[in-house]
Amino acid sequence: MTTASTATPPVVQLEAISKSFGPIKANQDISLDIHAGKVLALLGENGAGKSTLMNMLSGVYPPDSGRILIDGAEVHFVSPRDAIDAGIGMVYQHFKLVNSMTVAQNVLLGQEGSFIIRPREMEARVGELAKRYGLGIDPATRVSTLSMGERQRVEILKLLYRDSRVLIFDEPTAVLTPGETEHLFLALKQMTSLGKAIVFISHKLKEVLQVSDSVAILRRGEIVGNTPRNQITSSADLAKRMVGREVLQEIERGEVIKKEPVLQLQNLCGNGLDNLNISLRKGEIIAVVGVGGNGQQELVNVVTGAMAPGEGSVQLLGRDWKQFYKRPSWRDTIAHIPEDRLGMATCPELDLTDNVLLTTRQGFAPKLFLNRTLALDVTKTIIRRFHVACPGPQAHARQLSGGNLQKLVLGREFFRRPQIIVAEQPSQGLDISATEEVWHRLLNARTTAGVLLITGDLNEALQLADRIAVMYKGRFMDVFDASDEKKIASIGLMMAGVSP
Amino acid sequence: MMTEMLIPLLTAAVQSGTPILFATLGEMFTERAGVLNLGVEGMMIVGALAAFLVSLATGNPWLGVLAAGCAAAALGALHGLVCLSFLGNQVVSGLALTILGVGLANYLGTPYIGKQAPGFYAFDLPFLSTLPFVGKIFFKHDALVYLSYVMPLAFWFFWHRTRTGLALTAAGEYPPAASAAGLNPVRLRWLGILGGGFLVGIGGAYLSLAYTHLWTNGMTAGRGWIAVALVIFAFWRPGRAVFGAYLFGGVMAFQLRLQASGTQVPSSFLLMLPYGLTIAALLFSALRGRGGSSSSAPAALGVNIEPEQ
């Protein structure tokens, strides 16, 4: 841990915090100090446990074990309200603003001094506060007319107005333009110089280097590094620290003969995609890695038929996109394993049989009516073969844990004998055994299909993929063989948009 | 000649527009807190009956008005129970409220049909009533009409210049923002339902204590529904509600006069006029709203507040 590089005691101390959700250890034995006047960056992939940790600090839920100390005194937050009262505020990715109200009204909502409010006075106060912290904004404008960056400034002003001493920023630059990002960073400087403590959650290396005083790296729920900024030499250095090279989980890959191409993208543009070229063959897994929001969703939407391709050609099983999706057969074609398990992949309030029928019903309706008896049998078989722990096929999807739900989804999708499989974050939030099972299933699927794996977990990509495509701002920075050590070492850089 | 015909018509428009104005402002109050209450018709008629009964029993019409507000708010509380406490469907609950209210008023009111209760009577406001033209139209009415003149202004002030009004708007626009500000959006919505209900009740009271002084079954005759439509027509703004209410009042008064004048047009068509106008008004607001006036309807209108986590 950091030794006392700063003379002042930390505002917030986290001591040996642990938190589990069922079998998943979201946070394990985490200790962190947050200092006034400093920016602490919390770096890690999706599902690394950043949000869990910050939710505990902002009072959303309590830790299973460990202590939170503020100014050296232990606190127990019951609700976010308590955390706010203790001076800890969070700028969420989803702004909690009333669009039809002005900036000043939003900032003062619930904080007005008197029953009758005077807009001029409110606006003057908010304007002054904005000026002091370098957050240029007109307090009299309506939020609905503001840009994302300006809305974020309103959120920040809300916290500053409540005299928050610790401000937590959850991926604050995700919604910002480059110019707005610069503006935010200046404001962060201003805030720290006025004594605020900042926690900056991100997975963008450059930004972390630009703003932070120290960097804590989270991986799989644990702190794997906590380093003062001045000891980090470059973003490549940081990338190495974040990605790590020690393999957390090994899996026997086995070799599969690669056959004919099943999915071909040629100069695919539009929808935020930028000239994508790739050919996925039966028998191989291509992992698309990158920071979330760099076009992965759009790519998946086009390939799975949810969104028409802009320019360029998309060939699925040798047919043009338009032709393929005119009358897609439920069987022998394409299967999608969505990231949103309880919502897109399944309906929480339906039983497992109905959930199996969601994508396979054509197979059970030879004429007008559904053959439910057959569907029930198939569901039972899936439950048995894929080891879905559940009360039975009559259970509702929401009753299942994430891992079991994912196994059910895999079982359902494999029942369709797909030749193309699009898997998004298939092991996110799963425990180790469930992750292994999902990995095995995907590897085995290669014998009959090509797999397009969208993942934010580099380890997953390295374990499963034959080839790796790094995505940044809608384009592939590079597509390379998964055995190319040199390229692998620079994945972190490519994810940050740097061509090595 | 023209003004001689116009002044009585406009005076009547104000008078028959007043109950609609109260009901519209009441529903607007509820909707701006994010709750859609289609029970206005039922609450209004229960208010009308309560006003009539209490005024009959006590001889004091003001107590009648108070009773009307309380009765309508109590009926609204049922809506609150269904939608705020048990997260029921707001549309279904509101419709049920109307059916319940109308049925209840008819059942309890039947023995009083044709009876007369002490109510409100017109009096001239000093000075103002002597103004040319407007004096005759606006300042020769009863106390409730004068009260209704103050309401839109008071509401504008409440929504834009008071802490509670701001909080109420937040509860109707985006409850998470209200929660994040340390407010309780569910409690604010209760205020919206009860406060709005009280006003709707006064609208009902106007019908049985000022517009007429007797009780007849079904005396609201769809005015509650018109109020619901007017809230949309008014884009949830009190100023436009005044305009809308008097427009409808005018059409109602006009068709009565036309009937009395012995026109060839069948009376059924004339009776249809206000409701036809309702559809036209909704069409108008839909067309106007299509341009993207996103700031009109409360964003979270009709959306229940799910408990957090």
Image: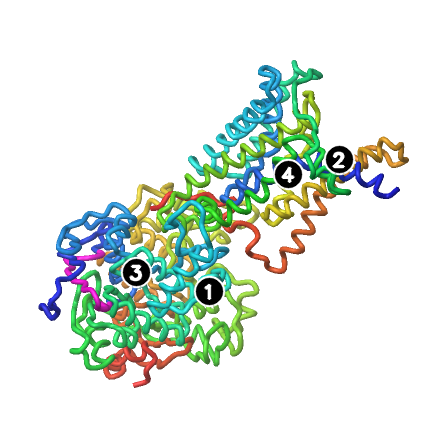
Query: Residue at label 3?
Result: A428
What residue type is disc 3 on?
Gln
Residue B146, image x, y percentages: 64, 35
Q: Residues within 10 Å of mark 3 (few under 14, many from 20)?
A: some
- Give A404 or B80, whichever is nearer the viewer: B80
Please state which amino acid type lies under the numbered disc 4: Leu
**Residue under label 1:** A333
- State whether discs 3 and 4 lie on one chain: no
Amino acid type, label 1: Thr
Query: Which label lies toward us, 3 or 4?
Result: 4
> Which portion, as a residue range, is magenta?
A26-41
Q: Which mark is residue B12?
A: 2
Compare marks 1 and 3 and give the one earlier in the sequence: 1
Image quarter (top left, top right, bottom left or bottom right) of the N terminus of chain B: top right
* Subunit bearing disc 3: A
Quarter of the figure with residue A214 = bottom left
Q: Nearer the viewer, residue B178 or A133?
A: A133
How far apart are the two marked residues, 2 and 3, measured between alpha carbons?
Answer: 69 Å
